[in-house]
Amino acid sequence: MVLTPEDLFNKRFQTTKFRDGYDQDEVDDFLDEVTEEFRRLIKENEELKQSLVAAESRIAELQRNTGATPSVVATAPAPVAPAPVPTADSDESTSSLLQLARKLHEEHVREGIEKRDQLIAEGHQTAARIVEEAETRSRQLLVEAETQERVVTQRIQDLKNFETQYRQSLKGYIESQLSELNKALNETPSAPAGA
């Protein structure tokens, strides 16, 4: 029977009636963990199969290009055979396989270096773009702050001018009222002393 992650996930246990059984929540949690691990392993297995097929096709291509005798390539693991007795042909085949392995290694190293350089260049471009955007935003914020500062400064000056004018007019009003009061007091006839 092939066991799938869904089989594990959907598995249900019967509860016991006459004695204590397993904690259902604990069993469910464990099954969830097993299911996730099972899915991960299946995915990893598929990726490895794809990598193997790609590597085998690459080896076959390189063997065609170098004229080496093709080795037996199987999609499934081959049974382990007894070690062959070394001969001149096997030494030549081993030598060509070593050359092929070196070429593959050098190719992978070169591709890795190219990928690394590409990623570094992209990283530098991204960093430069982010710095440029930050500087642009900083300049915009600075201009906005300076504009707001001018507006606030002008408002403060307007309020100071208003205060000065208000104090002067209030002072003039109070002085005019005092002046009129003094006139009124001076014009009032004094009352007779015997009255």
Image: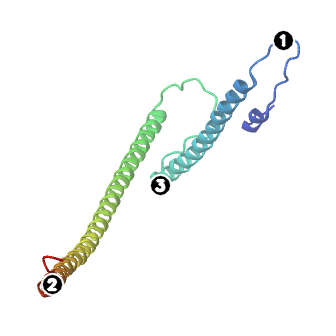
Q: Amino acid at mark 1?
A: Arg
Question: What is the basis of the colouring in this image?
Answer: rainbow
Residue at the image position 17 percent from the left and 78 percent from the top:
167
- Above/below status of 176 relative to 194: below
Q: Quadrant of residue 34?
A: top right
User: Helix, strand or loop at disc 2?
Assistant: helix
Marks 1 and 2 sit apart, C-alpha to C-alpha, by 103 Å
Q: Which disc number belongs to residue 19?
A: 1
Q: Indicate which label's residue lies in the foreground, 3 or 2.
A: 2
- Above/below status of 25 relative to 154: above
- Above/below status of 124 relative to 59: below
Q: Which disc number belongs to residue 65?
A: 3
Residue at the image position 26 percent from the left and 74 percent from the top:
148
* Foreground pick, 44 / 109: 44
- 195 left or right of 51 in image: left
* Residue 43 x, y percent position in the rendering: 62, 42
Q: Is residue 73 visible?
A: no
Q: Indicate which label's residue lies in the foreground, 3 or 1.
A: 1
* Residue 37 x, y percent position in the rendering: 63, 33
* Foreground pick, 155 / 64: 155
* Foreground pick, 167 / 129: 167
- 100 left or right of 180 in image: right
Q: Amino acid at mark 3?
A: Asn
Q: Which residue is mark 2?
A: 172
